[in-house]
Image (cartoon, helix red, strand yellow):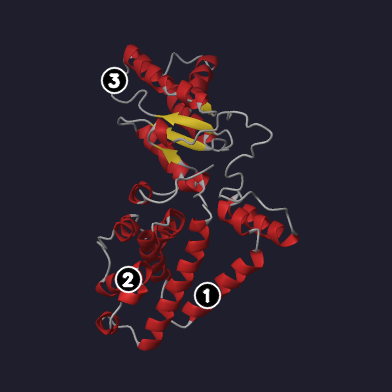
Amino acid sequence: MTKPLLILIAGPYASGTNGDPELMAQNLRRLEEAAWPIFRAGHVPMIGEWVALPVLSSAGASGPTDPLAAEVMYPTAERLLQHCDAVLRLTGESRGADQDVAIARSRGIPVYYSIDEIPDASAEAPVPEDEPALESGGSFLPEPPLTPAAQALYDEDLADDGFVWNLSRLWAYQPETQQKLFDLMGDAIASSGLSKRQRGILVTAAASTLGDSYCSLAWGGKLAKFADDPAIPAAVLTGTDAGLTEQEAAMAAWARLVARDPNSTTPADVERLRAAGFDDAQIFAITAFVALRIAFSTVNDALGARPDGQFVATLPTEVREAVDYGRQPLG
């Protein structure tokens, strides 16, 4: 279950009111309308004005139009964001809310644009003692007994990301096998000279063809960073390949062929890779890498691994919207 989050509600307050107290009060009521749904979902809502307005009053200011407000209103939200776990950005033009979003993104915390996007952390119905909780390990299998190798896997997740991935809970059955598989992937692609962006294209093209939401989301997020453009992974995940070079489009097409039906490839398909600039050693490396990624996805998908909700919430909207297949996020 998702842990409770402290969520800052950001939206218009003084913007567009020309200092009219009634309009500002209406805007505050609109912000507060989001408080109950957030609380009902198991989280703690926060609005900057709940803190800033009493601070202004205690300083003797006349209100949000007082000259002192510039020293209180925006700085309050900025300080709150050092403690908040997420931001809910409501619609409407607001320089302050846009600043809140920018700060949140710089801190790497999720920004939601709808109540429906916020993961549910409310108390779940009790499960009878003779009926084990489903997906307690984020997959069809319960989390296995903890071993030193599994603990090392978990510790690495916590150090890098602050939570244990559902994939790690699944592969805790055989952490050594996962590591050997990752080592094989690295060995297969090491001599290819492919960039991180190109590797991301291969994985997202193959994963989306398989209908593997976990790797599609995880590598879609990586590719967005490698390409410095979330539209690139969205294009690969949806198969349009917009924004790719001719060579990148050729490798994406090959990855899809291998994932869809490796027996359907022809010498002409290989020739297209050569025409795109790949030599035969690179073609073999690309194919071996994709095949090993498919093996990894096959284990995850067959055993019901669910994408991690706390990670998915941090992804660009373009990536999240492109992955409308496979298993839904959990946690």
Quarter of the image for residue 88 reads top left
Q: Nearer the viewer, residue 110 or 269?
A: 269
- Disc on the earlier residue, 1 or 3: 3
Q: Residues within 10 Å of mark 3 (few under 14, many from 20)?
A: few
The extreme front residue here reads 130
Residue 301 percent coordinates (x, y): 48, 57
Q: Residue at x 25, y 60 (%)?
A: 240
Residue type highlighted by circle 1: Gly
Label 1 close to label 3 by CB (< 8 Å)? no
- Disc on the earlier residue, 2 or 3: 3
Q: Residue at x 40, y 19 (%)?
A: 28
Report, in whole angstroms, how far the alpha carbon at label 1 lies from the one at label 3: 59 Å
Any part of residue 193 in sight: no
| Residue beneath disc 1 | 186
Label 2 sits on a secondary structure element that is: helix
Q: Residue at x 64, y 52 (%)?
A: 158
- Disc on the earlier residue, 1 or 2: 1
Q: Nearer the viewer, residue 100 or 287?
A: 287
Q: Residues within 10 Å of mark 1 (few under 14, many from 20)?
A: few
Residue 10 percent coordinates (x, y): 41, 30
Residue type highlighted by circle 3: Asn
Tell me: 179 left or right of 37.
right
Residue type highlighted by circle 2: Leu
| Residue beneath disc 3 | 18
Tell me: 211 left or right of 272.
right
Q: Nearer the viewer, residue 96 or 8?
A: 8
| Residue beneath disc 2 | 257
Q: Residue at x 43, y 20 (%)?
A: 32
Label 1 close to label 2 by CB (< 8 Å)? no
Report, in whole angstroms, how far the alpha carbon at label 1 lies from the one at label 2: 22 Å
